[in-house]
Structures are given as structure tokens and as C-alpha cells.
Amino acid sequence: MTDRDASTTGADADHGTTGSDADHATTGREDAAPAAGVDRDHGTLLSFAYPDERRARIVADALAPEVGELDESRSGATVSRDGPVVRVRVTATDLVALRAGITSWSRLVAVAERVSRDR
């Protein structure tokens, strides 16, 4: 068990924040750009809430180099942090690629969490 709360929601869900302390720093590209002429009709937003902003920052910073490194022709992802919450938006051209992207990013988050425990 980890010390964060994770939730998965549909890509069209509104996860905006209010308040002046929201940190909207996006790690990686603002939008996962698909190959020319490719529509990414499928997507999800993975949200991971941590006990403090420091831990969330460490996890988000660890994920940053991975953005754009996976199969961009069929899927893509962006990573953002809003205070103690890290969000990974995964988009894909088909459901198989979406499932693979969710699995890959969930594993990357798990590794980042293990590494951040020692810091």
C-alpha cells in the first residue's frame, strides 16, 4: 500500500482547481501531440494524491523525462502537478494502446513513488 490516493476518471472529466495556491506546472508537453492526421479518441486521467506537495513534486519530476518516450504513434501522455496531486493524462488512438499506456504510466508512477520514499 502506498501513502497516496489514486483515482482514474474519463478523459472528459473536469479536474480544474480553484484557489491561488494551485500549481499548474505541466511536466512535458502541454498536449500529447499525435502523429500527423492521427486522432486520439480515447483517453483517461490518472490522479495521484500525496500527503504533501514535496512528495508530489518529487514524483512529477521523476516522471518528466518519460513524457514522449513511449510509442507516440498510437498513444501519448502528459504529466502535471497541482499542489499535492500528480495527474497523468493518457490518450490513444485505440483501446489496446490506451490500456498499454495506462499500464506503463501506472508502473512508472509506482517506481517514482518507491524512489521518492528515500528522499
Image: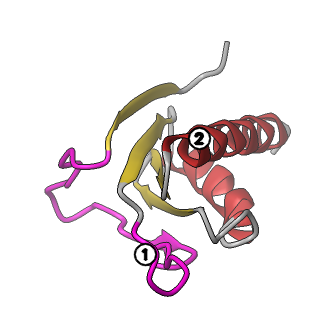
Q: Are marks 2 and 1 in contact (CB under 8 Å)?
A: no
Q: Secondary structure at mark 1?
A: loop
Q: Secondary structure at mark 2?
A: helix
Q: Is residue 40 left or right of residue 4?
A: left
Residue 99 image position (x, y, % from top left): 58, 37
Q: Please give the name of the residue rendered at 36% of the width and 65% of the height, measured from the top-left corner.
A: 23
Circle 1 sits on which residue? Answer: 31
Name the chief secondary structure element in magenta: loop
Most foreground residue, 34 or 67: 34
- Looking at the image, residue 51 lies above or below residue 60: above
Q: How many marks?
A: 2
Residue 31 image position (x, y, % from top left): 43, 75
Q: Please give the name of the residue rendered at 54% of the width and 45% of the height, measured from the top-left corner.
A: 98
Q: Quadrant of the N terminus?
A: top right
Q: Quadrant of the C terminus?
A: top right
Q: Which residues are magenta?
A: 11-39
Circle 2 sits on which residue? Answer: 96
Q: Is residue 52 left or right of residue 3?
A: left
Q: Please give the name of the residue rendered at 71% of the width and 64% of the height, measured from the top-left corner.
A: 71
Q: Is residue 37 magenta?
A: yes
